[in-house]
Image: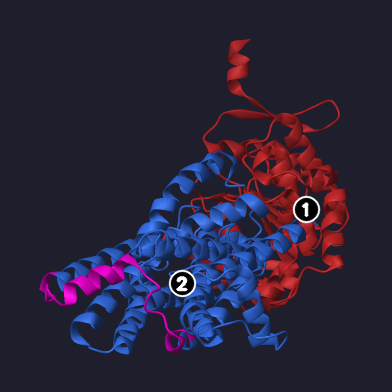
Chain colours: A blue, B red
Amino acid sequence: MKNSFLFGLMIAVLVASLLISLALGRYEIDLSTLTQLLLWKVLNIGTAPKEVMLLSNIVFDIRLPRILAVVLVGAALSVSGGAFQAMFVNPLVSPGILGVLAGASFGAALGIMISDSWFGVQLFSFAFGFVAVLVALGVAKIYGRSGSQTILLVLGGVISSSLFSALLSMVKYVADPYNKLPTIVYWLMGSFSAVDMKTLSGVAIPLILSTIVLSFMGKYLNVLSLGDEDAKALGVRVVWVRNSAILLATLLSTLTVVVAGMIGWVGLIIPHIARFLVGADNRVLLPMCALLGATFLIIVDTLCRTSMSVEIPIGIATSLIGIPIFVFALKNAKKGFA
Amino acid sequence: MSFYSAENLYFSYNTTPILEGVDLHIQEGSIVSLLGPNGTGKSTLMKLFLGLLSPQSGEVRLKGKTLQSYSIKERALHVSYVPQSTQVAFAFCALDIVMMGRIAFESWFQKPSKTDKDLARAAMERLGIVHLEKRTFQTLSGGEKQLVLIARSLAQGAKILVMDEPVSGLDYGNQLRLLETIMKLSQEGYTFLKSTHFPEHALMLGGYTYALKDGHILAHGLTCKTITQELINELYHTNIELKQTVCGYPVCIPSFVHTKV
């Protein structure tokens, strides 16, 4: 009962922030004009507002793709963060735990250095996100049978992250400092400013599908968080469930880098806030993560593009906003992250 | 055909042998206690019976089929595990934990049904812990946690419970209450394989005892016949005397008690 109310409320907040974000920007549109435009364009109700060409250009061609991308990326980062936290039975885990973010960043930087097309950069980023996770899994596999699988995976992730961070530094070092290096650095700070309809349509379906499927894995992740032996004895195919969750979460995280570069902290703090609201049950927690993450990132992105005359890179903003929230969320650490 | 048994089990971690040629037979509805000093392979043996580990040679058979021939799901419908301690990092309530026993019955996108919830509640009621259902698992006492985990096994529907030192960490009263619960469940037809550090607990529950030392079965049979003064002293390097009380019930009395007097 309490949960369905919370979900209703959060959906309302998400829709409200969507609308406000559509209205705000360099060219401000008041909410009544925006409503009029949306009703007319989408549902064919009422009359067209004044300057309809200009308005629909701004709203539908410029702002909407970006905002939809923000929604998807916010949800994806938060759900994969929540899933990884359940899987590793550790509330301090973030989506980058298996090296996917380091790998995707390296891939993007490499792509920027050797390729001139944006699509090439995205492809490199996507591919190396997966390569990094495979490296982590491979390292864990070397010592496969003995000891706890999760600890080996974490160590594999540490190794893989370090490896790809080092490779990233190397790319930065050799990249052309006037032309390529600034692009790489700016990419790593994260931004949605380059998002267009083409990028969005390419990543939307895998992002939406993986977010939904991962959210539905909640009950298995619940059991997995009791530890491998318990889960196996309860009849869960641990390896299969874990690998599927890792695959989906990797796909989600690496796609976020493809769309918007490095955006830190969202995948770490949103699950904490969601857990604070609805408890630790992943069946409820993961959908709540998706809603909260989307809303949070819309708000931050809107601030990034409207609060100053130049756009603030969103990765910087999420860190600056995320850190105090995280310090506050740690208060719950003693209660088992209730 | 035996109900649940292991024949000629060999198991080693890397090159260190843990179990060498172990035979163990469990009859339906009986209680089997595993006795033995620390590090003799009791936990390993139970994990082999649960299918959490696979033996290098030999096999575990359940109802005539090898354990490997069951799928993980099918196995969970027959055998359940009550671990010594479950680390729960997240704040699940007791009912959530018990409900997890039903997971093998649900398919991917299925929500737990009303029946699942009723079965979980019924299991908690049976153990008298229904009042704990909304409590966070970590805030429960050791005894309450054990009961919640047993309730999870009952909800799982498995008629065989494998318990790793079920009384460890419990106070005296909770130890006795837990043993009573095991006794009652066994009278209702549940089968138990449990390890214990207390020969007296094995004697209280009766059933069968297997004494394990250095990866071998040292002695086995009916508990009242198997647990002898000599066996305990050999197993644990102690010096105790097994005495019959007035009502014929055996108790262990360590020798230092006499020297004190």
Residue B69 horizontal side relative to residue A272, left or right: right
Give the residue at mark 2.
A27
Q: Using a 10 Å C-alpha cutoff, classify the residue at mark 2 as few (fewer than 14 neighbours), some (14 to 19) or many (20 or more).
A: few
Nearer to us in this view, B140 or B70? B140
**Can the viewer see residue B207?**
yes
Instruction: Tell me, for residue B151, which label it has, or none.
Output: 1
Which kind of residue does numbered mark 1 sit on? Ala
Q: Residues in magenta?
A: A173-200
Q: Is residue A178 magenta?
A: yes
For disc 2, the chain is A
**Can the viewer see residue B217?**
no
Residue A161 place in picture, x, y as percent: 30, 65
Residue A170 place in picture, x, y as percent: 15, 70
Residue B149 place in picture, x, y as percent: 71, 51
Q: Is residue B244 above or below residue A178?
A: above
Residue furthest out toward the top: B261
Residue A148 horizontal side relative to residue B168, left or right: left
Q: Using a 10 Å C-alpha cutoff, classify the residue at mark 1 as few (fewer than 14 neighbours), some (14 to 19) or many (20 or more).
A: many
